[in-house]
Image (spheres, rainbow, N blue to C red):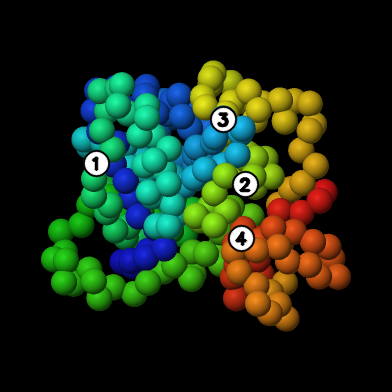
């Protein structure tokens, strides 16, 4: 088992939590289960991705896994709507543990990795687990699967981040915040920028959220790995 230190899990509890969340994320919350982590995004009224990650069904809550830098942004995003609901976004943030093996306590995340829903190990033992963040980050980049950080929040349409390629957008589920813009961008072919990879070996002074230019073009960096990164650039 490994500690995935780059992310945290928030828990949404309360009456009809799935129904509530349906109005604020791009995936169909009726498909959230304990077997497979469901990719999702939360968008602004302008259709820009505020946060994204994976949702899974827990015994008493919906678990929402996202980058650790974005959790407060997501709380602020949902807060005005939670005030008038019967749901609660719990105050704590859980560490996330992953494994390359599977059993009845795990949920499929991405190929070769499974999220551990419950663990009986003492906290002092868990604290010493190896960090899988770098390995998972490299695999996400290879899969063209973006995990938004605070520095890239609110900048890009879901299609610019290729989130539809991983099942994060359900175009038949009905209304959610930003849905009209997201749908119009797809059905009218209005997206002129998209996700691509670039080599980072010779890149200097580059970081997530910055604009980077090389011989292949110019783009906004959304993820970085040891050898390659992902940027949003002109199609």
Residue 129: x and y in percent read 28, 73
Q: Is residue 83 left or right of residue 179?
A: left
Circles 3 and 4 in contact, beta carbons < 8 Å: no
| Helix, strand or loop under label 1 | loop
Identify the residue at image location x=34%, y=74%: 130
Identify the residue at image location x=35%, y=55%: 8
Q: Is residue 26 left or right of residue 165?
A: left
User: What residue sits right under mark 1 in the picture?
Assistant: 90
Residue 158: x and y in percent read 62, 40
Identify the residue at image location x=39%, y=34%: 78
| Helix, strand or loop under label 4 | loop
Identify the residue at image location x=59%, y=26%: 179
Q: Check disc 2: other Cα within 10 Å, few if <14, some if 14-19, many if 20+.
A: some
Mark before the other along the chain sequence, 3 or 1: 3
State how far apart marks 1 and 2 are (Cα). 27 Å
User: What residue sits right under mark 2 in the picture?
Assistant: 155
Mark before the other along the chain sequence, 2 or 3: 3
State how far apart marks 1 and 4 are (Cα). 29 Å
User: What residue sits right under mark 3 in the picture?
Assistant: 45
User: What residue sits right under mark 4 in the picture?
Assistant: 209
């Amino acid at each position: 088992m490994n500690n995935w230190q780059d992310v945290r899990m928030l828990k949404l509890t309360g009456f009809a939590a799935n129904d509530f969340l349906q109005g604020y994320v791009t995936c169909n919350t009726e498909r959230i289960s304990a077997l497979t982590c469901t990719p999702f995004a939360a968008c602004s009224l302008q259709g820009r991705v505020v946060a994204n990650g994976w949702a899974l069904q827990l015994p008493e809550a919906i678990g929402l896994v996202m980058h650790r830098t974005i959790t407060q942004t997501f709380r602020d995003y949902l807060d005005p709507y939670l005030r008038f609901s019967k749901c609660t976004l719990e105050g704590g943030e859980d560490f996330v543990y992953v494994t390359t093996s599977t059993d009845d306590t795990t949920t499929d995340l991405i190929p070769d990795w499974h999220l551990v829903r419950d663990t009986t190990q003492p906290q002092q033992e868990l604290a010493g687990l190896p960090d899988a963040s770098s390995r998972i980050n490299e695999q996400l980049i290879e899969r063209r699967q973006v995990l938004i950080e605070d520095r890239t929040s609110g900048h890009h349409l879901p299609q610019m981040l290729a989130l539809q390629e991983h099942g994060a957008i359900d175009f038949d589920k009905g209304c959610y915040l930003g849905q009209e813009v997201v749908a119009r961008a797809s059905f009218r072919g209005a997206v002129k920028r998209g996700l691509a990879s670039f080599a980072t070996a010779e890149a200097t002074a580059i970081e997530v959220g910055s604009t980077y230019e090389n011989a292949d073009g110019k783009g906004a960096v959304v993820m970085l790995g040891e050898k390659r990164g992902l940027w949003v650039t002109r199609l």
